[in-house]
């Protein structure tokens, strides 16, 4: 019998997707008395796009932060591309650079130009030469549609533009996997699409992505798999089609009915 946490049998994906890239095994995390991640087992394959969805406080952000070791875990293991994440040290910095992260708020460096925001990491951490970093940054800014804003400061850009710069900045580190934590939830509706479009094309180009979002259109278009979390647990995993049309658990049904009534 299939285990409820087994990924769906997505035969059409079998060829496109590679081996395991992000593997969480029996991960637990508490904040004091609060058990926020409960026995999380999760495997994301190379090239796979996983959307994580669930009620507020269910542990989605903590999961992302744990994968990036911004948040220590109490037990279990997390590995990226076959290497277990150490708790600290030089190896951690190197492995963390393999994980690009885009948050809800844009958190660009306010006193640096858009171009500098995208060249800083690669020159400091990846050791790229100035002109190489600049060329790469301009290519990336072009790709996310804001190359013409390169000389400005973040405050001069719209929220959607800033979020696209944040994506370019993360990509500039050439990460193996990109984590997105509600990247469009702070944006005005007209800017959501432009950010989701960039994410969709990234997915199509084969980037491995873990995306916390309630944008069902994006999930249907770009996700290979939806993971539904509630109260620190992975309650359900399915293809977007299965999940949105025929959720199995009562908790998912309840959550989706609230989401749809908004
Ligand atoms: N630094 C912290 N200290 C104490 N409790 C925390 C901390 N960060 C998160 N929590 C708690 O852990 C639980 C999970 O939080 P988390 O932010 O991961 O949820 P979430 O699913 O991302 O929610 P949302 O949809 O609102 O972003 C919540 O109950 C939250 O209050
Ligand atoms: Mg969150």
Image (tube, rainbow, N blue to C red):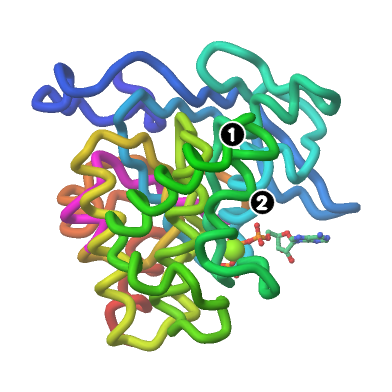
* Helix, strand or loop under label 2: helix
- State the residue position of label 2: 62
Q: Position of residue 108 (x, y in %)?
A: 61, 67
Note whether ligand 1 is within 8 Å of mark 2. yes
Q: Residue at 9% of width from left, 26% of height from top?
A: 12
- Quadrant assignment, res 104: bottom right
Q: Position of residue 152 (x, y in %)?
A: 51, 77
Note whether ligand 1 is within 8 Å of mark 1. no
Q: Residue at 41% of width from left, 31% of height from top?
A: 5
Q: Which of 247 and 84 lies nearest the eye of the viewer? A: 84
Q: Do the residues labelled 1 and 2 touch (CB within 8 Å)?
A: no
- State the residue position of label 1: 40
Identify the mark nearer the N-term, 1 or 2. Answer: 1
| 31 horizontally vs 113: left or right | right
Q: Which of 214 and 5 lies nearest the eye of the viewer? A: 214
Please determine whether, in this image, residue 32 is positioned above or below residue 84: below
* Helix, strand or loop under label 1: strand
Q: How crowded is mark 2: few (under 14 residues within 10 Å), some or many (20 or more)?
A: many
Q: What stretch is highlighted in magenta?
A: 218-231
């Amino acid at each position: 019998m299939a285990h409820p946490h087994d990924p769906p049998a997505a035969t059409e994906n079998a060829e496109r997707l590679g081996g395991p890239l992000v593997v969480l095994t029996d991960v637990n995390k508490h904040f004091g008395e609060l058990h926020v991640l409960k026995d999380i087992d999760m495997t994301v394959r190379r090239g796979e796009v996983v959307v994580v969805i669930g009620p507020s406080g269910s542990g989605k952000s903590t999961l992302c932060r744990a994968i990036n070791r911004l948040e220590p875990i109490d037990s279990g293991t997390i590995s990226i591309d076959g290497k277990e994440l150490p708790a600290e040290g030089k190896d951690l910095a190197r492995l963390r650079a393999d994980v690009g992260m885009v948050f809800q708020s844009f958190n660009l460096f306010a006193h640096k130009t858009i171009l500098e925001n995208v060249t800083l990491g690669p020159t400091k951490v990846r050791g790229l030469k100035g002109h190489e970093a600049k060329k790469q940054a301009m290519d990336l800014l072009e790709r996310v549609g804001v190359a013409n804003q390169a000389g400005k400061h973040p405050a001069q850009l719209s929220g959607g533009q800033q979020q696209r710069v944040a994506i370019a900045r993360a990509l500039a580190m050439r990460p193996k996997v990109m984590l997105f934590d509600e990247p469009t939830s702070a944006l005005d509706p007209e800017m959501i699409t432009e950010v989701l479009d960039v994410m969709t094309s990234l997915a199509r180009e084969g980037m491995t992505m873990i995306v916390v979002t309630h944008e069902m259109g994006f999930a249907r278009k770009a996700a290979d798999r939806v993971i539904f979390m509630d109260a620190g647990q992975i309650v359900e995993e399915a293809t977007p089609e299965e999940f949105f049309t025929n959720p199995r658990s009562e908790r998912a049904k309840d959550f989706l009915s609230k989401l749809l009534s908004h």
